Image (cartoon, rainbow, N blue to C red):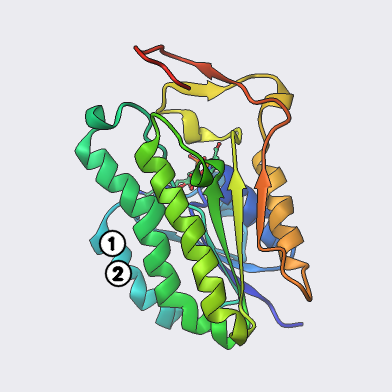
Amino acid sequence: MEILTALITGTSSGIGLAISKKLLGLGYKVYGISRNYSNDLKLEKNYIHIEKDLSDLKKIKELKSLSKEIESLDLLILNAGIGLIGFHEELDEEKMISMLNTNFTSAILLTKYFLKKIKENKGKIIFISSSTASKASPLASAYSATKAGISHFADSLFEEVRKFDVKIFTIEADIVNTNFYNDTRISVYPNSDSYTEASELSEVVEFFLNQKKSVIKKISIEPQKKRVEKKTRIQNDFI
Ligand SMILES: NC(=O)c1ccc[n+]([C@@H]2O[C@H](COP(=O)([O-])OP(=O)(O)OC[C@H]3O[C@@H](n4cnc5c(N)ncnc54)[C@H](OP(=O)(O)O)[C@@H]3O)[C@@H](O)[C@H]2O)c1
């Protein structure tokens, strides 16, 4: 049987790790990009790790050559991302540029580098976006802009490539229990009804992959209860 091949960014933890495990379970050969190499993937014979810092534009551009090394590609998942939360004027400029490159530029450029291969296989592209893509997100204006950009890019790209039988999907998630909040001033509320598990997003990916005819392009997934814990409180706190 032909082995399908996937390339996914941000495989060292959280959503990307959960999706990688799901794809390996489904029999995919998985190329994963992140700075760290998860121990959970080190023994997987069908997992190939590519160590790369996607916050650095020069490093992102180095991945152009990978599109020649990977012979065939059926699935591309743009997942790597970080969140900067705080008053916009107080955010660290270099961290902000890193976030823009990781969340947005890397996804746009990797899509450009691999689209030809995806078209050749009538493949699929999945973007991991956020509920912040479509709502005002005080204290996360720049982060939400990266996600709004990604969701819009996905919608537009689908119009461009649908005639080639390429499917483009977006997951807009909210409060997933991952390392995402480690360096922010909020954390997930500890009750299980107040966060989504990364494995639930991997189920959404499997649902996308099983679509045969019409395309359910976007899924928004949220925990039942909307609450987070604040590690620190700041003046004029909105979230
Ligand atoms: N958690 C949530 O509530 C939530 C909600 C909506 C959307 N999302 C989105 O989901 C995606 C995955 O986040 P997560 O929740 O799974 O958080 P996570 O556990 O912190 O995972 C983030 C992943 O992105 C990778 N990454 C971060 N910076 C990178 C860089 N400079 N170069 C290469 N890879 C980098 C990390 O790998 P390394 O650190 O090893 O490089 C890691 O594998 C993000 O795009 C995030 O915006 C998350």
- Contact (Cβ within 8 Å) of mark 1 with mark 2: yes
Q: Which mark is residue 59?
A: 1
Residue 80 in the image: x percent, y percent?
A: 46, 51
Some atom of ligand 1 lies within 8 Å of the CB belonging to the residue at label 2:
no
Picture layout, residue 231 above or below residue 77: above
Cα separation, mark 1 vs mark 2, equals 5 Å
In the rendering, which numbered label is found on residue 62? 2
Residue at image x 51%, y 56%? 151
Count of all numbered marks drawn on residues in the image: 2
> Left of 93 or right of it: where is 199?
right
Q: Residues within 10 Å of mark 1 (few under 14, many from 20)?
A: few
Quadrant containing the N terminus is bottom right
Q: Residue at x 70, y 20 (%)?
A: 191
Counting from the top left corner in percent of width and height, residue 67 is at 42, 78
- Tell me where residue 139 sits by quadrant: top left
Residue drawn where x is 67% and y is 37% of the image: 222
Q: Please report the residue visible at 40 percent of the width from the left and 65 percent of the height from the top.
A: 108
